[in-house]
Image (cartoon, rainbow, N blue to C red):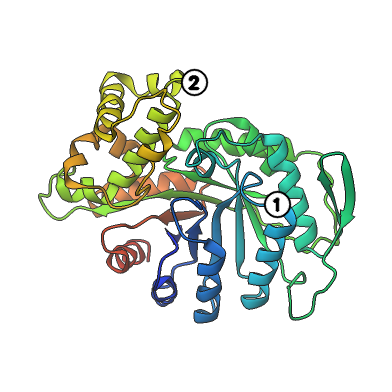
């Protein structure tokens, strides 16, 4: 299986991209969560100039964050810096919207956004709407400004629901998911994508990358001999994923209680403790300002008790080498093409371990 890495925009991000390329990793992604992290397009511009081979991904942008013309301009500008190496992840903005205290956008708007990006990034015109006004738009200059000749790969963020996977199928895009390590769930996503793709016409002149790859974002902790799989080191390496899930469950507990219910009694108790610890409630209108600071960052030692073993096992890869390889092989058989890790403790070391594991 191919391997890649996801990071937050930060000073020195280009050095991490260079190291990832030296290690032979396939892709390097930067998050797009404006109120929590830095800007991915600024970060990836630095990475594009510092690297020559590794593919560069935005993970993920959304019509709830950026207009299609602005996002397409950013993507095509990156494509001019790193021709044919750009991957654009698109989603409903589940996290990026919730960090604003807002709900994600709809699958229908996501599909329109994806179609517009694919058209514009391939040098075609597309329909652009603002209220009752509808206009055909296209890049009015190309050349050195933007690159619409080399293909850009598009992937749609999907969890367990079928709507996003269907968008991916209709748009000829791939899939990316966060912490989804269940092979059965991946089979279901791919079945939905294939079904939606059947009979969908394809433009033979399109310059959009037609490959439909699947990516899973997780964290990886290779256990030392006799190391506790749920000890402090393992919790620190995977806790950012677990805390992100608990934050989502806490944020949605009032309006979508079914998600928290699926976590079981232990998980619901962890959600309650998280809310208490952050000094907020599931119904507080400003809860997003308390739940999402340091989102996907290294967890504090006092929060280790919230990193439940059951959630670690669900969201992350923790184990001895042979156990990890067996799980990864099962994911590959389920159609996952690339494993993306999100390192927080020591990114260069964690990237090197990933490279050694999969080579």
The kind of secondary structure element at disc 1 is: loop
Q: Is residue 102 left or right of residue 137?
A: left
Q: Earlier in the sequence, mark 1 or mark 2?
A: 1
**Residue 176 rendering spot, x and y as whole percentages:** 54, 47
Which residue position is annotated with label 2? 255
Quarter of the picture holding the C terminus: bottom left
Residue at 67%, 71% in the rendered image: 77
Q: Nearer the viewer, residue 206 or 66?
A: 66
Q: For this rendering, which residue is in front, 135 or 113?
A: 135
**Number of disc labels:** 2
Give the quarter of the image for residue 267.
top left
143 vs 263, left or right, is: right
In percent of the image, x 22 and y 51: which residue is there?
A: 320
Q: Quadrant of residue 349?
A: bottom left
Q: Quadrant of residue 168?
A: top right
Does any portion of residue 209 appear in the rendered image? no
How many residues crowd around disc 1 within 10 Å: few (fewer than 14), some, or many (20 or more)? Answer: some
Whether residue 336 is situated above or below residue 308 in the rendered picture: below
Disc 1 from disc 2: Cα separation: 28 Å
Are discs 1 and 2 less than 8 Å apart at CB? no
Q: Residue at x 34, y 49 (%)?
A: 294
Query: Residue 223: x and y, percent?
Result: 19, 52
Please say whether residue 341 is visible from this viewpoint.
yes
- Residue 71's place in the image compared with 179, above or below, is below
The residue indicated by pointer 1 is 67
Relative image position of residue 73 (x, y in whole percent) = 71, 64
The residue located at (41%, 66%) in the rendering is 10
Q: Does residue 66 sit above or below 160 in this rendering?
A: below
Residue 28, position in %: x, y? 48, 65
Label 2 Cα neighbours within 10 Å, binned few <14 / some 14-19 / many ≥20: few
- SS at mark 2 in the image: loop
């Amino acid at each position: 299986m191919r391997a890649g890495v996801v990071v937050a925009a930060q000073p020195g991000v280009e050095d991490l991209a260079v190291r990832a390329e030296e290690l032979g990793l396939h892709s390097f992604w930067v998050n797009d969560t404006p109120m929590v992290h830095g800007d991915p397009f600024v970060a990836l511009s630095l990475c594009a100039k510092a690297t020559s081979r590794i593919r560069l991904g935005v993970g993920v942008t959304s019509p709830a964050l950026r207009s299609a013309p602005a996002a397409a301009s950013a993507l095509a500008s990156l494509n001019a810096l790193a021709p044919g190496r750009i991957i654009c992840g698109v989603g409903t903005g589940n996290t990026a919207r919730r960090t604003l205290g807002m709900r994600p956008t709809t699958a229908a708007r996501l599909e329109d956004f994806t179609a517009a990006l694919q058209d514009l990034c391939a040098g075609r015109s597309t329909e652009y709407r603002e209220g009752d006004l509808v206009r055909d738009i296209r890049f009015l200059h190309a050349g050195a400004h933007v690159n619409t000749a080399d293909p850009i790969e598009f992937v749609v963020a999907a969890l367990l629901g079928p709507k996003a996977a269907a968008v991916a199928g209709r748009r000829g895009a791939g899939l990316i998911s966060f912490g989804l390590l269940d092979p059965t769930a991946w089979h279901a996503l791919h079945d939905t994508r294939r079904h939606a793709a059947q009979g969908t016409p394809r433009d033979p002149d399109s310059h959009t990358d037609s490959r439909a790859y699947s990516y899973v974002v997780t964290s990886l902790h290779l256990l030392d001999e006799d190391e506790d799989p749920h000890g402090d080191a393992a919790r620190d390496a995977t806790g950012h994923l677990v805390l992100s899930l608990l934050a989502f469950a806490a944020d949605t507990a009032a309006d979508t209680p079914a998600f928290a219910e699926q976590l079981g009694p232990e998980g619901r108790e962890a959600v309650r403790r998280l809310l208490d610890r952050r000094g907020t409630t599931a119904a507080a209108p400003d809860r997003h300002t308390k739940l999402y600071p340091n989102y996907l960052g290294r967890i504090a030692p006092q929060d280790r008790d919230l990193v439940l073993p059951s959630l670690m096992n669900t969201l992350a890869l923790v184990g001895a080498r042979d156990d990890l390889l067996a799980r990864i092989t099962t994911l590959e058989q389920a159609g996952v093409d690339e494993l993306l890790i999100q390192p927080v403790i020591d990114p260069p070391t964690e990237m090197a371990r990933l490279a050694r594991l999969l080579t």
